[in-house]
Image (cartoon, helix red, strand yellow):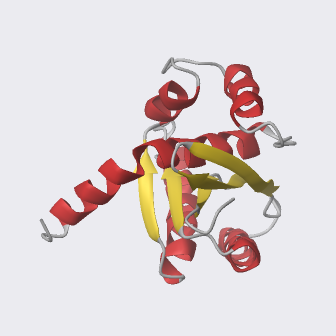
Amino acid sequence: MDQNAIRILGLDPGLRRTGWGIIEAAGSRLAFVACGTILPPESAPMGERLANLHRQLLGVLEQFSPHEAAVEETFVNMNPASTLKLGQARGVVMLAPAQMGLSVAEYAPLLVKKSVVGAGRAEKAQVRMMIGILLPRAAPQTDDAADALAVAVTHAHHRGAAARARAVHEGRI
């Protein structure tokens, strides 16, 4: 990629599995950099699991030095306890890049699927297939990593609008 490329970290938050994916975007050209899944120890107490997630995510940030981050918004479950736990993991996932000074955009799951597949109700297999087409070098080992790459691709397509919305919210426009 060229010097004007923006390195984007996409994140699919979860307490059991958090997917991450890094791409570079230069104009409309996208290139795969790396992806993976963070698996905090399920048997550990909640605080330890969140700390583990944070440490591993900081390691990804330090290793790949992204310029911007994007996170998939929480899908609200019928179970309030599950939603609360996911929210805690999502908070950690948003905190780590913000601590490194990155802007963190958020995208609804329907927008991510629509941006990558063209349909908001796409299945995980369709998302994974399209990631393979959009990023031919990518071979995500999990659906979580594929979803994280999809979030990064969505951000590459919508980052201008997201920056404007943030500026309006912060009163800069």
Residue 68, above or below 132: below
Q: Position of residue 58 (x, y in %)?
A: 68, 77
Between 60 and 7, the residue placed more toward the observer is 7
Between 86 and 10, the residue placed more toward the observer is 10
Give the position of the C terminus as an image quadrant: bottom left
Residue 16 in view in this figure: no
Give the position of the N terminus as an image quadrant: bottom right
Between 15 and 147, the residue placed more toward the observer is 147
Identify the residue at image location x=75%, y=77%: 59
Q: Position of residue 111 (x, y in %)?
A: 44, 32
Residue 7, above or below 52: above
Between 133 and 59, the residue placed more toward the observer is 133
Residue 53 in view in this figure: yes
Identify the residue at image location x=57%, y=64%: 93
**Is residue 34 toward the left or the right of residue 101 in the image?**
right
**Which quadrant holds residue 10?**
bottom right
Identify the residue at image location x=79%, y=68%: 44
Q: Position of residue 134 (x, y in %)?
A: 69, 33
**Which quadrant holds residue 11?**
bottom right
Q: Position of residue 114 (x, y in %)?
A: 49, 25
Total numbered circles: 0
**Is residue 25 toward the left or the right of residue 128 in the image?**
left
